[in-house]
Image (cartoon, rainbow, N blue to C red):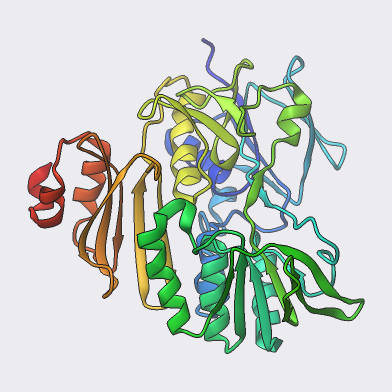
Amino acid sequence: MTAPERVVIVGAGLGGASAAASLREQGFSGDVVVLGAEPHRPYELPALSKGLLLGDTDEPDWVRDENFWREHNVDLRSGTHATRIELGARLVHDGKGGEHPYDRLLLATGSQPRSLPVPGADLPGVRTLRTLDDALALRAAMSDAKRMVIIGAGWIGTEAAAAARKHGVDVTVVDQISAPLLPVLGPEVSRVFQDLHSEHGVRWQLGSGVAEVTGGPDGVRGVRLADGTELPADLVLVAVGVAPRVDLAHQAGLELSDGGGVAVDANLRTAAPDVYAVGDIAAHFHPRYGRRVRVEHWANAKNQGTHVAGNLLDAHEPYDRAPYFFSDQYDLGCEYRGLADLDTDELVVRGDLAKREFIAFWVRDGQVTAAMNVNVWDDGDALKALVENDTKVSARDLEQGDLAGLV
């Protein structure tokens, strides 16, 4: 296979930017072009719903310092939106009329917030949180708001609730699920987060659907639930998940998975010659799980982007890292490794749920499929090994044993 002379990357988020940086760090001297729709240089997302929204910082974590891209001869085209791919001609078109030929193409277009399909969802004062500009605008709105309704009790919704309470805003969280984070953590662990927020004054409207956002041209007045309950609000955050940005891939004729992502093999390669995908859009055939997995977390974009650089240069190495994410809410910090199936896996808890100092393990057939440490920070390497090494363990081992000794 002929080594590439020109790599084009569509998407200047963490996945695409990590790939560009890794190409240079691996010694690639050809052209690297990165097309990014946002006006900012590449940044990481976690701080948007954590430190930046809390007011602890005014900037995100940048992928590299301001001079890196110029010093490493990366042609970073911020504010440039890719509009069309011609696979046969190996050409990417942008919204400014530019054409970008490629030898290898990487798609890293990320996700966009899902909309709320109810009347009033587009009123002034209804916000989403996905970009740096979103986070700065939401933080400014929080400083003026008195009552906020957050629609969605997932990670973004709960982290935003913690930030809003720090700003002194009255907060109600609405979701159709019966407990926050329930689809990821199950009832026992999700109760920890629900109680934590309740102690900090957050109110819950769970098991409730939204019928309408009320208000007018001057802004929102509230949220009306399906049962008729009226929740007054001068600020509404819609945090009902994200959808992968796959329109560009779909229009080009690339195969999409049943879950909506771009289908890629273990090496993060699509069926089209010399076209790869990483991050939120990648429905990746994961060697560890024997099926396609699409992960929307920060670490997946970063690690896949770094990894795929080698494959863009003909390494042919499968990506097999287990998913990882973290969250900080009030005085609770946690890390989650792996991929649990709540329908089949047994929950084993080491420590004290009530004190919010514990490790939760999800176990299937004597093997740890996922582990989450909450306010416990000494066992990260052991937890990673337990998730990734298919070690046979018992519930008693996990509850009382030396975790490092188990692996």
* Residue 135 position by quadrant: bottom right
Give the farthest residue toward the right: 217
State which quarter of the image contains the C terminus: top left
Give the farthest residue toward the top: 1
* 269 vs 384: above or below: above
Residues 143 and 34: in front is 143
Q: Residue at x 64, y 62 (%)?
A: 239
Residue 136 placement, left or right of 312: right
Residue 42 placement, left or right of 390: right
Residues 349 and 380: in front is 349
Residue 400 x %, y %: 9, 56
Q: Residue at x 61, y 27 (%)?
A: 257
Residues 125 and 100: in front is 125
Residue 192 x %, y %: 37, 69
Residue 25 x %, y %: 43, 39
Q: Residue at x 19, y 57 (%)?
A: 379
